[in-house]
Image: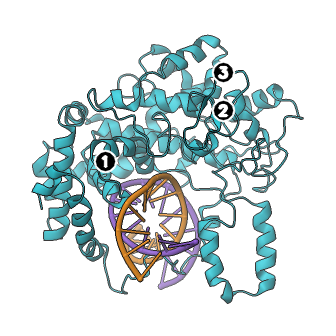
Chain colours: A cyan, B purple, C orange
Amino acid sequence: MPQLNGGGGDDLGANDELISFKDEGEQEEKISENSSAERDLADVKSSLVNESETNQNSSSDSEAERRPPPRSESFRDKSRESLEEAAKRQDGGLFKGPPYPGYPFIMIPDLTGPYLPNGSLSPTARTYLQMKWPLLDVQAGSLQSRQALKDARSPSPAHIVSNKVPVVQHPHHVHPLTPLITYSNEHFTPGNPPPHLPADVDPKTGIPRPPHPPDISPYYPLSPGTVGQIPHPLGWLVPQQGQPVYPITTGGFRHPYPTALTVNASMSSFLSSRFPPHMVPPHHSLHTTGIPHPAIVTPTVKQESSQNDVGSLHSSKHQDSKKEEEKKKPHIKKPLNAFMLYMKEMRAKVVAECTLKESAAINQILGRRWHALSREEQAKYYELARKERQLHMQLYPGWSARDNYVGGYGKKKKRKRDKQPGETNGEKKSAFATYKVKAAASAHPLQMEAY
DNA sequence: TGCCCTTTGAAGCGT
DNA sequence: ACGCTTCAAAGGGCA
């Protein structure tokens, strides 16, 4: 399954499930997120707390009560896979049309047709497209499309969901339209604005940056000089050119999704033909500006650092060799899953709608909203995630999620350290209830009511 | 300073 | 095949 049926498995099996999808959910969602966003939020939060606090056996009830059944539990039960499956079929045309009018994946040549041209890009998709797939735009070959994307900038996620809440608030100076850009483009953004593009200044860093992320869209961490066979440096350049940051393997693209991702050939050839060899990043993991690419988590960062704690377990020799290895091999992050993509996109909005800042609390809300999403909406993210994985796969053929396992599988990382042997997630959840209450209590009067 | 918390989903590994 | 574990993002909380 992880192999996505070869995505190419675009036979995409049978997903009758999707056929039963309804539209009501989406509208409802829109409504709830628009006009009564705050109230809804409070509602969600309160139910969140109540739910986790009061019991563990009726966890799924509150939602059902709160919202008109956007989808049945049965859907949810099998939706995970169903959606994936369904999403996979998208290429086959199942999703053609309305549900995902502007799916970004259109940038993938063979996917282009059905979605892009109709001009009815969903804001979300537009966002995604803009930022993540500028190349597509370029490939489309036109200033026109480029301009179109620029024009599309004005609308922000806010307008998607709310017409009254200035969702555009981005905690970390992340452009409101960046949510779907994984791998911290916001960090990268300020890095190196294309000379030919107008640049504003990042309020945080003071570093000039392009007015819009789409032009930079560093999606995946570059693996300059490594990731085995993908030392393609173009990635660094790409952002400046409004290209995706993906390194393109010169040697060998794997084609797990022959039918779906013909993008490889076209993209790589395009890039190689577009960018002269000299436009190569001077340093691995360093932007041409000298600013390290955020997506490339250097060994000293986070996880690795924690590993040092465990370092005593390893010989210094081992550490040395490891260090060296890490030097060469930047940390390639996992592709974001559907929910992560959703979180990225919606977090700012949720944060803007309430005073909550704690991610833990925010994530709970997001989790709720995720469940409340219509099938179409979710499918959209599943599809995005699928493409993400595909792309990731192509860019980092040798990469495995295992590569990121700090302590190795089976060894519990520092996290969840307090989890007792028999402890369940639910128990943990419950234990965290106080945290939630606390967080929410300090957050919003409306939210307080529930407590 | 750095881990923990939360969420869902993907993926790896062990049984 | 199934179940468990880790990681992905995010940022305030906390030891």
What kind of element bears circle 1?
A: helix
Question: Which sits earlier in the primary sequence, circle 3 or circle 1?
Answer: 3
Q: Determine the residue located farthest toward the top in the rendered image.
A: A144
Q: Tell me the number on the disc at residue A370.
A: 1
Of circles 2 and 1, the one toward us is 1
The residues bearing labels 3 and 1 have C-alpha atoms spaced at a distance of 33 Å
- Position above or below: A308 against A378: below
Question: Which sits earlier in the primary sequence, circle 2 or circle 3?
Answer: 3
Q: Residues within 10 Å of mark 1 (few under 14, many from 20)?
A: some
Which amino acid lies under the numbered mark 1 shown in the image of this protein? Trp
Per the image, the residue denoted by label 2 is A263
What kind of element bears circle 3?
A: helix
Q: Which chain letter goes with mark 2?
A: A
- Residue placed most toward the observer, A377 or C1: A377
Which residue sits at x=29%, y=34%?
A: A19
**Image location of residue A3, percent across then percent down:** 56, 53
- Residue placed most toward the observer, A62 or A169: A169
Are discs 2 and 3 located on one and the same chain? Answer: yes
Q: Is residue A108 visible?
A: no
- Position above or below: A93 against A68: above
Q: Tell me the number on the disc at residue A202.
A: none
**Image location of residue A440, percent across then percent down:** 23, 59
Q: Tell me the number on the disc at residue A138.
A: 3
Q: Which chain letter goes with mark 1?
A: A
Question: Which sits earlier in the primary sequence, circle 2 or circle 1?
Answer: 2
